């Protein structure tokens, strides 16, 4: 908990923020010795008492003050434990990568022996362990680790502060850094850069200071690119591209994906950017597993006798695509007697009612018509789990190619029409659907089904029943009660925006609620005002704000667990609030 560091934006573990030191430092950042003062190692003093006195001398500093630390081998606990010390300004404390002891309160935590974290498993375990052991509203500093090639991965792991130590040292050793890796400068026939430093070296000879200047420029350029990726909410896509530089970085990303809980509780509910699933690692993304889990566990399919399985389309939402418009024409009036589910990679299953939810409405994949073993296994496991929960009398599968074969190989009993959008294919679809829908029960209003599905998807089972209880009127993207009082509306991003009346209907479920103290918020709700919050809440979620004097609705800016432990930052952007 700190009053000197504040997180401003989150995209997974990657964050932008500000550290209030002698100067305001916008993170992620490269800091220098001018930004902090350090008491150094305890072993540089004649006695432990001298080290403690040196720490006392840091009081009153406006810069980040790093307390004395006890060096230790990478997998060892420090031999000594120093007493905690309070400072008036921002405080830095060293944490050891694999220590089990919770560190004292600080504003910035320095990862000890960070430059020695060469093994991907050690790197991921060290950063994840440090982040889990320290409060969310504190910064993590990893010295002597950053290069232009690995900076994006380090920030995505959860590191806020880095430095130039490694690229400067490598410059002195004749190593030439770019975003694509590091080379011995003397072995390069041509320098693959047109910065002023490289131009000068090309005209004369490679010099240490010019090489250092080039390395620093490439590192600073990469930092700007990473910051922009976080702002654009596309850091994951950026990292997936960048880790291909070395096998070690690719391994580190895969190991990080195995830390699912660490990633999930830091990943926003939705993003403004398009979700690109360009590689095998995309199957492990939180957005993919979260969507599938909610479809299987939260979502409840309408009572329908007939299930129609369809392929996805390049255009999103699917209903706006040419192929799905043709499918709709072929199905005709039978559409009110069947339920549609789209099969796709990497999301596996997308019920028609959820095609506007994130990330179903805004994802893109390389289309080859080929389904690899992992994609097939993921799809069929999700389909099997879905069909165990949601029962249908008859299934029509309008699929083709490897997708059709994957579903057939799973043992699903269905009428397979061969897929396609040409005349004969659509005739086969129309005939199969007409036959399957004979004597089938008619479904309710598809617009109400969409609202019910979204409510359950975003607020949990039972939310749809609570929100749509009684007579409901649908007006465009808004639903109203029988008195024409607005209850909720769907946003262009596929989220649900609750009205105060809609929030009242959901309050009794006790989910996605942020409890506050005895006050009426004005403007955004700050983290210090939060008394309790649902642990399910993620950045971007619609939440209900409840207090002794207040009731309101808004969007979460941080996760529920983070709201409860942070002392700086906006917890909820409130849209409506009123006194009780």
Image: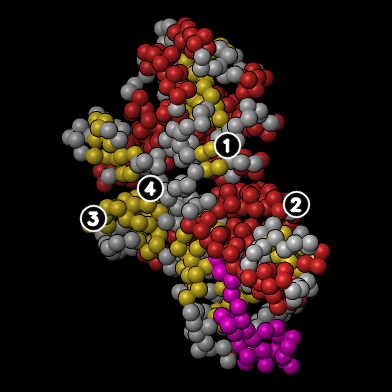
Q: Which residue is mark 2?
A: 247
Nearest-to-viewer mark from 1 and 4: 1
> Is tag 3's residue or tag 1's residue first in the polypeptide sequence?
1
Residue 401 vertical position relative to residue 471 in the rendered view, above or below: above
Label 4 to label 2: alpha-carbon separation: 39 Å
Looking at the rendering, the stretch of residues picked out in magenta corresponds to 28-55
Residue 296 % position (x, y)? 52, 32
Residue 204 % position (x, y)? 74, 74
Residue 269 vertical position relative to residue 367 in the rendered view, above or below: below
Q: Is residue 42 magenta?
A: yes
Q: Which residue is rendered at x = 52% and y = 22% of the image?
A: 310
Q: Which residue is mark 1?
A: 365
Q: Which residue is mark 3?
A: 578
Q: Which residue is rendered at x = 52% and y = 9% of the image?
A: 424
| Colour setup of the view | secondary structure
Residue 186 % position (x, y)? 81, 67
Residue 545 shown left or right of residue 535 in the figure: left
The extreme right residue here reads 187
Residue 321 vertical position relative to residue 85 in the rendered view, above or below: above
> Is tag 2's residue or tag 3's residue first in the polypeptide sequence?
2
Q: Are marks 4 and 2 in contact (CB under 8 Å)?
A: no
> Is tag 4's residue or tag 2's residue first in the polypeptide sequence?
2
Which structural element holds mark 4?
A: strand
Q: Which residue is rendered at x = 56% and y = 59% of the image?
A: 226
Q: Is residue 30 magenta?
A: yes
**Residue 316, visible in the rendered structure:** yes
> Is tag 4's residue or tag 3's residue first in the polypeptide sequence?
4
Which structural element holds mark 3?
A: strand
């Amino acid at each position: 908990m700190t009053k000197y560091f504040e997180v401003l934006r989150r995209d997974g573990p990657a964050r932008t923020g500000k550290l209030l030191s002698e100067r305001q430092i916008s993170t992620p950042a490269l800091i220098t010795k001018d930004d902090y003062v350090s008491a150094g190692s305890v072993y540089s003093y004649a006695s432990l008492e001298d080290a403690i006195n040196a720490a006392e001398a840091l009081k009153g500093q406006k810069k980040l003050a790093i307390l004395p630390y006890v060096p230790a081998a990478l997998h060892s606990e420090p031999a000594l434990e120093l007493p905690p010390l309070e400072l008036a300004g921002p405080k830095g404390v060293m944490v050891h990568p694999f220590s089990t002891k919770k560190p004292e309160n600080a504003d910035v935590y320095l990862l000890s022996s960070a430059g020695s974290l060469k093994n991907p498993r050690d790197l991921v375990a060290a950063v994840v362990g440090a982040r889990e052991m320290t409060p969310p509203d504190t910064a993590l500093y990893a010295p002597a680790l950053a290069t232009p090639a690995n900076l994006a991965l380090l920030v995505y792991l959860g590191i806020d502060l880095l430095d130039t130590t490694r690229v400067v040292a490598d410059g002195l050793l004749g190593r030439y850094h770019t975003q694509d890796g590091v080379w011995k400068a003397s072995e390069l026939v041509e320098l693959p850069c047109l910065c002023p430093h490289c131009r000068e070296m090309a005209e004369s000879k490679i010099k240490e200071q010019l090489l250092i200047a080039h390395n620093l420029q490439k590192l600073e350029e990469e930092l700007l690119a990473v910051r922009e990726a976080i702002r654009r909410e596309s850091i994951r896509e950026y990292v997936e591209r960048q880790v291909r530089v070395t096998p070690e970085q690719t391994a580190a990303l895969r190991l990080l994906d195995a830390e699912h809980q660490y990633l999930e509780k830091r990943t926003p509910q939705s993003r403004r950017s398009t979700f690109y699933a360009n590689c095998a690692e995309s199957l492990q993304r939180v957005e993919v597993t979260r969507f599938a889990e909610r479809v299987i566990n939260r979502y409840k399919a309408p009572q329908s006798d007939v299930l129609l399985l369809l392929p996805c389309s390049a255009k999103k939402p699917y209903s706006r695509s040419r192929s799905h418009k043709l499918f709709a024409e072929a199905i005709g009036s039978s559409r009110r007697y069947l339920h549609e589910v789209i099969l796709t990679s990497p999301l596996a299953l997308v019920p028609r009612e959820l095609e506007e939810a994130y990330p179903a409405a805004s994802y893109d994949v390389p289309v080859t018509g080929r389904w690899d073993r992992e994609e097939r296994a993921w799809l069929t496991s999700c389909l099997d789990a879905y069909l165990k929960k949601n029962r249908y009398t008859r299934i029509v599968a309008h699929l083709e190619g490897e997708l059709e074969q994957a579903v057939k190989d799973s043992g699903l009993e269905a009428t397979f029409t061969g897929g396609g959008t040409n005349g004969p294919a659509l005739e086969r679809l129309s005939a199969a659907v007409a036959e399957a829908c004979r004597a089938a029960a008619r479904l309710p209003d598809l617009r109400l089904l969409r609202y019910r599905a979204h409510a359950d998807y975003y607020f949990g089972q039972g939310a749809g029943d609570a929100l749509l209880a009684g007579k409901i009127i649908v007006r465009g993207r808004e639903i109203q009660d029988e008195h024409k009082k607005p209850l909720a509306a769907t946003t262009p991003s596929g989220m649900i925006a609750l009205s105060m009346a809609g929030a009242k209907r959901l309050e009794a479920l006790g989910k996605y609620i942020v409890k506050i103290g005895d006050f009426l918020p004005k403007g955004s709700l700050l983290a210090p005002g939060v008394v309790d919050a649902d642990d399910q809440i993620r950045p971007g979620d619609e939440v209900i704000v409840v207090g002794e004097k207040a009731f309101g609705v808004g969007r979460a800016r941080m996760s529920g667990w983070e709201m409860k432990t942070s002392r700086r930052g906006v917890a909820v952007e409130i849209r409506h609030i009123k006194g009780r």
